[in-house]
Amino acid sequence: MNNDLLFDFNVDKTAKTVYITREFNAGQSLVWDAFTKAELLDQWGAPAPMRAKTKYMNFEVGGRRFYAMISPDGQERWAVQEFTSITPKTNFKMYNAFADKDENRELPGSEWDYNFSEQNGITTVNITIFNESFERLEKLLEGFKIGFTMTLKNLEELLTSLS
Amino acid sequence: MAEKFDMTRQAVSKHIKVLHECELIKPEHSGREIYYHFNAKKMQEFDHWLAQFRQNWETQFTQLDHLLTTIKEQATK
């Protein structure tokens, strides 16, 4: 039903920036709510089978959202979003960083910039994610290494069960 | 190399260490010298990982599509 909605995903490695554009078949006001209200964010903010859980969220400049992505086996990955700029219904910016369960942030994080616009009942959301440091890219690669190791481990288990 | 990139030798060697750890470059020892080669296969794996990152976003946005439809239906009831 939504096959004609635009989805664009680009990574500029040298600028350390990710660009995402997506259209939604809903008004700007509703889409804005879906991105800025905890009770709605938790219903879509993690890719299944993961789920998102917001501990608290103060959507105001200087306010924070403290939330976790939870895997099916119950592992929690906490993060803190700090809102740095808000123009209702059209733009907000935040600083996102991973954290432990006690809200201690692991810096550096990344800067997120969201833009919303509507035309003929279709709302376009533009997201720019900027990773400030080389260390952050290191961390992404590190995450990749862990993921790759896990895949090998799964393969190992599969081979064991087959033999 | 440090001169070319306008950074200290320590900084260059730290960057190389990280790239090596991530296996994006491969060292080849030749006497006292070490030559580093670009590991295209590993970069491809990184691109594959990025594709998964993109897939995660696609999954989330599809979830949001469903949520928006549900909310709109409830509003018209």
Image (cartoon, coloured by chain):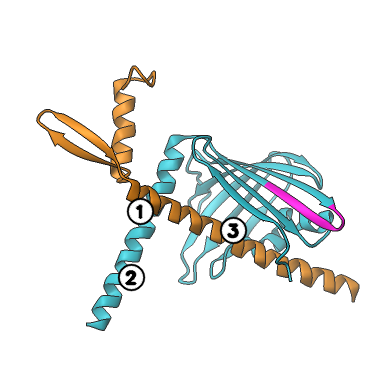
Chain colours: A cyan, B orange
SS assignment at label 1: helix
SS for tag 2? Answer: helix
CA separation, marks 2 and 3? Answer: 24 Å
Left or right relative to A99: residue B75:
right
User: Neighbour class for label 2 at 10 Å: few (<14), some, many (≥20)?
Assistant: few
Rendered location of residue A45, percent (x, y): 63, 60
B51 and A60: which is toward the camera? B51
| Residue B28 locus on image (x, y percent) | 18, 38
Question: To which chain does the residue with label 1 belong?
Answer: A
Read off the residue under disc 2: A154
Give the residue displayed 38% in from the left and 54% down from the top: B45
Q: Which residue is mark 3?
A: B57
Q: Is disc 1 surrounded by few (<14), some (14 to 19) or many (20+) residues within 10 Å?
A: some
Looking at the rendering, the stretch of residues picked out in magenta corresponds to A119-126
Q: What type is the residue that disc 2 sits on? A: Asn
Q: Please name whichever residue, A91 or A107, is drawn nearer the observer in this view of the structure.
A: A91
On what subunit does the disc labeled 3 rest? Answer: B
Left or right: B13, with B50 as reference point: left
- Find residue B58 and report its image quarter: bottom right
Quote the CA–CA distance across marks 1 and 2: 14 Å
